[in-house]
Amino acid sequence: MVRLGLITGFIALIGVLLSGLAAYRVHDEELTVDRIALARAIDVHASLVQDRLTERELLARVASGLFRSPSVIKANMLKPLRSSIYAFKTDFVVAGWIARLEPDELEAAHIELAGAGFPNPTIRGYDDAPLDTRSLDRPVDLLMDVEPRSEAMKAFPGRCFDQHPILGPMLARAMAEGKPVASDPLPLLRPDGPIGLVLAAPVLQEGEAQPAGFVTFSYELAPLMLANDDLSLFSVVLKDPRSDNGELIANDRGVVISRTVSPPGPRPSVTRTVAFGGRDWSLSYYAKSNAVMRAQQTAAIVAAIGLALTAIVCGLFGYVAYNNLRLSREIQVRIGFERRLTAVIDELNHRVKNILAVIQSIVTRTLRHGSDIEVARELLIGRIHAMSNVVSLLSESQWQGVKLKGLFEARAIPHAERIAVSGPEIAVSARAAQSLSLLFFELASHSDEGLSLVGKHPHIVAHWEVTGDGPETTFHFRWEEFNTSAATRRADSDFGVILLDRVAPEALGGISKRYFTDVSYVYELTAPMQTVVDMSERDRTEQFSAPLNPLR
């Protein structure tokens, strides 16, 4: 009883230690899994955001490239582009055509805007105040057309935006760089409108160095950030480029608002950078849940379960210790035998199915492509005999490989006495042996009718070699029939062509080629040595053939 008590106490100690270790591991793994899941979700989100931004920048480039008008002082410049713009199915708020005009062109622009039916064709500033066009001594960026042409949007044409505090620098930069440029975040349409971005693409007329104007697209910021997902693991904010501590975040109603982050506040879990409009934007991600607290709770549950199981095990141990030892040994031995028997049967089924599949393919392709029934019969018998021979060789070696030279025996292929075989000793795998045996039979069977001009049977040389070291080791095989030519040698059958050119190379993961020289017919096969000698197959076979160690 004292010994049993000591054993029970030792088991309890082990159980407590294992419970603590399991709780520690679960805590660590929970944190790791949460971090990985969060990182993957953030990467996917950032990729989707970048894709959306790229699509919208591409729309601006396409729209600017479609302009082919001799005059830019038109109030319907976007009309030819409407079908192309809407084909992208983008979610822009408003698209606009901003013409860069000299002061003497403003009167013509005023007449054009009035003729287009816009309610206020007066040339105005960005704040809707009329401009004294006679005092201007510089070009202005005048909004001439908008899309869609709703009643609210028709009030904007006629405004000049070159002096706008946000849009003015954007247009100047787009003109200088000659590519689409995005603005800083700003309210769209009205002072209290949704916060968004404006993307301006310069339009260059043929033969002109300076842009004739700009195609602009305005987008709300929330859809661009994909910020309206309540089920996501994080909340995403956009770093405000105008402020070091400013962030733009969508609230629960999907409205983007600005906030200031103080240094003691929570730090973002991850920051990703996306490109849009010729500038980089920083997206900060804040995890919505406390991964550390959840991991601690899970670890506490695991520890409690471990301690409970330890108590149960210690209580049952004394009850079953006296009469369970012999029975458990017998059960373990029986389970071991059953598992091994199941594995052996599975392996046997696998190999038998492979052999039957190969035989089925041989029969089907031989009868399908055989023009003469007697010729097809002889080829079918020979091919099946070649398969039978390689299976016999594999059985003799307990499926641990076959010597490559053994595949050239007289019982395996016809006319073996006329074949000069040379090459290093190689034990090929079962899979490679099956493919090579059919390959050698096909080559040898077609060499029978290859007579030279002097009436002699061709002399055949089969040679292989191994080159390279380590993973780069390569197997090279060459079959050459002398005293034959394309006119005297029987052409390869359809089955033979498929076997020589596709089946055998694919089975060994290599390449092959066949051709005639002036005095011979040559077939070459090159494959990685690791597929010719499959060590994993050999190790598995040795495991099955090894004696089982009985339990003591």
Image (tube, rainbow, N blue to C red):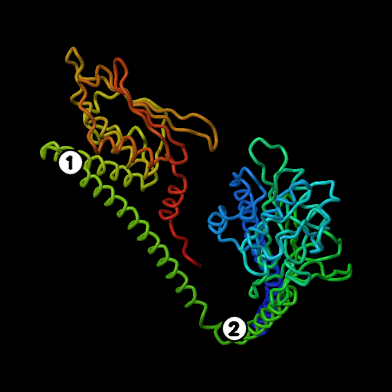
What is the three-letter code of the residue carrying label 1? Ile
Residue 318, image x, y percentages: 60, 85
* Residue at the image position 59 percent from the left and 44 percent from the top: 68
Measure the C-alpha gap from mark 2 to mark 1. Answer: 66 Å
Q: Which residue is mark 2?
A: 317
Crowding at mark 2 (Cα within 10 Å: few <14, some 14-19, many 20+): some
Q: Which residue is mark 1?
A: 381
Could you say which quadrant of the image residue 150 lies in?
bottom right
Decide: is 548 above or below 299.
Answer: above
Which label sits on residue 184?
none
Q: Label 2, secondary structure: give it.
A: helix
Q: Is residue 36 visible?
A: no
Front residue of this view, candidates 26 and 154: 154
Decide: is 537 above or below 495.
Answer: below
Decide: is 68 above or below 82.
Answer: above
Residue 389, image x, y percentages: 26, 41
Left or right placement of residue 306 versus residue 437 in this view: right
- Answer yes or no: do the residues labelled 2 and 1 have beta carbons within 8 Å? no
* Residue at the image position 36 percent from the left and 48 percent from the top: 398
Quadrant containing the N terminus is: bottom right
Residue 225, image x, y percentages: 68, 64
